Image (spheres, rainbow, N blue to C red):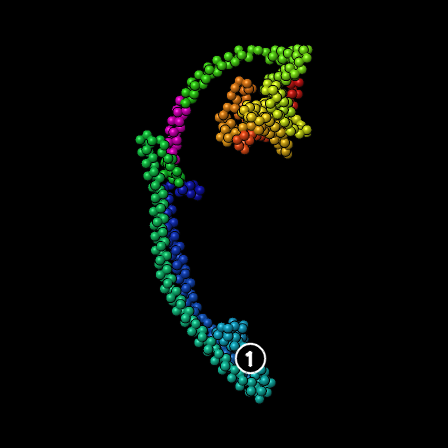
């Protein structure tokens, strides 16, 4: 039941107004109660200002009572007077316990210390006087009694001085307390007025927060009525009737926007379908043409190249035979590995064949160097990733230079990856051209004497193969300083590919 009432109050405007009333009333009540408590405390301090003077007067009276009881016992020597003496002596000692007995520089505390010391001496003399009287030593108890009278006068004098000093200080404190009470009255009044003003501002702020969403809701509803559906959503700040109304309006506006957006998307999809239909018709025609061009059997091509190599050997044309064999190996690798994985060593062997074919065509103008570790092992990579890079280095790097063209293929091993470097000493590339190549906006293959595979194709296949980006990077130090291509081969991903290929090959076998 209580939980239900709390939820109802938190979702009702009337409940909020009632809560505000009780909140402000509670603030005023607590403020008034606190001020009254402070005033009562100050009045209690005023009442206790002269308590020290009362204590001094009591101490003087007890001292007088001790002296009177001693005198009475000396004259009467009655047991009743002796009991009165011991009682008054004990009361006096109890009052002395509250006196200061420490060394200090304060005049009033010094007076208390002197009174306490003299009182100890005085009580010792009175005890001695009583003992002498009980022992009937007349001369001694008379002498002791005279000393107690003299010391009693000294102590009374010190107590009078202490009382006067306490009266002076207490009067000053009393005046300060009266001034403080007057300031307290003024401050209390100022606090009450401030609380009232703050409460009014708080009330106006809360009412504004309740009315503000209604004004915003009215404005947005007017915008929607005029056809402007891009108006901002209202952020409900509460769960009351206004908040529910704002949330409902937001839902309605969102549904309208979603409906309009759905209509727009349907129109765009319809337009895209028309464009795709036209593209499919063009691709169909292109595929039909390429199908006719691909009717030549690859086996017929390889067998013909092998026959040419054998014929060249029979005619003692060893260079021609080697050239034809390299050509056959190169094309066989391209056809066999285009859709398969391969090892890094097989990729490097394909690059060797490609360089050999180019050097035969270009009369040996390309110097090709390799730095490959002997323990490189079986590293699996996507096929046809090195030959396009070497081809790009030849066509766009060293083809038109006056000096001898050089290409370096280097493999470095690290703990978590292999680094493949293809570097030439050609014309180099500008930063703009490097960005275009990496983004796929620059076509690195421009004639019919290439394999048709560009650098962006290599970048895309590396990303798909290893599931990582930025595996291929380009670097150039400036014009005529050559270009360096770096490929990172993650070992962990390569090992996973190796296992998958092993399972696939086992299943195929």
For the residue labelled by badge 1, is the local secondary structure a helix, a strand or a loop? helix
Residue at coordinates 52% horizontally, 75% vertically from top-left?
A: 113
Instruction: Please determine whether, in this image, residue 509 is positioned above or below residue 150.
Output: above
Instruction: Please determine whether, in this image, residue 95 is positioned above or below residue 190.
Output: below
Asked whether residue 155 is drawn in magenta, I would say no
Asked whether residue 265 is drawn in magenta, I would say yes
Q: Relative to the observer, which residue lies in front, 301 or 446?
A: 446
Q: Is residue 248 left or right of residue 306?
A: left
Instruction: Please determine whether, in this image, residue 56 is positioned above or below residue 21.
Output: below
Q: Which residue is mark 1?
A: 121
As drawn, the residue found furthest toward the front would be 402
Q: Quadrant of residue 332?
A: top right
Look at the image and tell me whether residue 141 can be seen: yes
Q: Quadrant of residue 273?
A: top left
Residue at coordinates 50% horizontally, 12% vertically from top-left?
A: 289
Secondary structure character of the magenta stretch overall: helix
Q: Which residues are magenta?
A: 247-267
Badge 1 crowding class, 10 Å Cα cut-off, few under 14, some 14 to 19, many 20 or more, is few
Residue at coordinates 56% horizontally, 19% vertically from top-left?
A: 451
| Quadrant for the C terminus in the image | top right
Q: Quadrant of residue 183?
A: bottom left
């Amino acid at each position: 039941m209580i939980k239900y009432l709390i939820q109802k109050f938190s979702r009702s405007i009337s409940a909020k107004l009632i809560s505000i009333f009780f909140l402000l009333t509670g603030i005023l009540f607590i403020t008034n109660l606190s001020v009254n408590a402070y005033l009562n405390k100050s009045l209690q301090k005023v009442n206790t200002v002269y308590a020290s003077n009362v204590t001094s007067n009591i101490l003087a009276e007890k001292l007088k009572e001790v002296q009177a009881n001693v005198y009475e016992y000396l004259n009467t020597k009655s047991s009743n007077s002796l009991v009165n003496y011991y009682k008054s002596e004990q009361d006096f000692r109890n009052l002395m316990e509250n006196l200061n007995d420490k060394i200090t520089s304060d005049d009033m505390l010094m007076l208390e210390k002197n009174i306490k010391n003299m009182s100890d001496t005085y009580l010792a003399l009175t005890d001695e006087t009583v003992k002498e009287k009980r022992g009937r030593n007349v001369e001694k108890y008379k002498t002791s009694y005279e000393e107690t009278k003299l010391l009693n006068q000294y102590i009374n004098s010190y107590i009078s001085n202490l009382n006067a000093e306490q009266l002076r200080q207490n009067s000053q404190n009393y005046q300060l307390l009266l001034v403080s009470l007057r300031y307290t009255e003024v401050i209390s009044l100022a606090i009450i007025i401030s609380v009232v003003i703050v409460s009014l501002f708080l009330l106006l702020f809360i009412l504004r927060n309740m009315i503000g969403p209604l004004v915003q809701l009215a404005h947005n509803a007017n915008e929607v009525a005029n056809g402007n559906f891009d108006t901002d959503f209202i952020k409900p700040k509460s769960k009351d009737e206004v908040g529910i109304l704002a949330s409902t309006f937001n839902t309605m506006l969102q549904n309208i926007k979603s409906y309009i957006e759905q209509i727009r998307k349907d129109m765009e999809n319809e337009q895209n379908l028309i464009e795709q239909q036209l593209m499919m018709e063009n691709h169909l025609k292109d595929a039909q043409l390429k199908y006719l061009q691909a009717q030549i059997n690859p086996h017929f091509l390889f067998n013909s190249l092998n026959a040419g190599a054998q014929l060249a050997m029979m005619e003692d044309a060893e260079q021609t035979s080697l050239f034809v064999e390299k050509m056959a190996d190169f094309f066989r690798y391209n056809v066999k590995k285009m859709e398969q994985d391969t090892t890094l060593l097989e990729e490097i062997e394909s690059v060797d064949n490609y360089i050999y074919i180019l050097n035969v065509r270009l009369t040996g103008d390309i110097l090709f160097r390799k730095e490959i570790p002997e323990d490189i092992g079986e590293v699996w990579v996507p096929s046809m990733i090195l030959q396009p890079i070497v081809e790009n280095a030849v066509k766009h790097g060293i083809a038109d230079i006056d000096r001898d063209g050089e290409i370096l293929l280097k493999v470095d091993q690290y703990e978590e990856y292999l680094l493949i470097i293809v570097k030439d000493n050609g014309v180099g590339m500008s930063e703009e051209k490097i960005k275009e190549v990496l983004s796929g906006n620059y076509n690195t293959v421009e004639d019919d004497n290439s394999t048709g595979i560009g650098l962006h194709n290599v970048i895309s296949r590396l990303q798909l193969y290893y599931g990582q980006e930025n595996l291929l990077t380009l670097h150039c130090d400036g014009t005529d300083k050559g270009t360096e291509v770096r490929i990172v081969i993650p070992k962990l991903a390569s090992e996973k590919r190796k296992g998958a290929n092993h399972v696939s090959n086992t299943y195929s076998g």
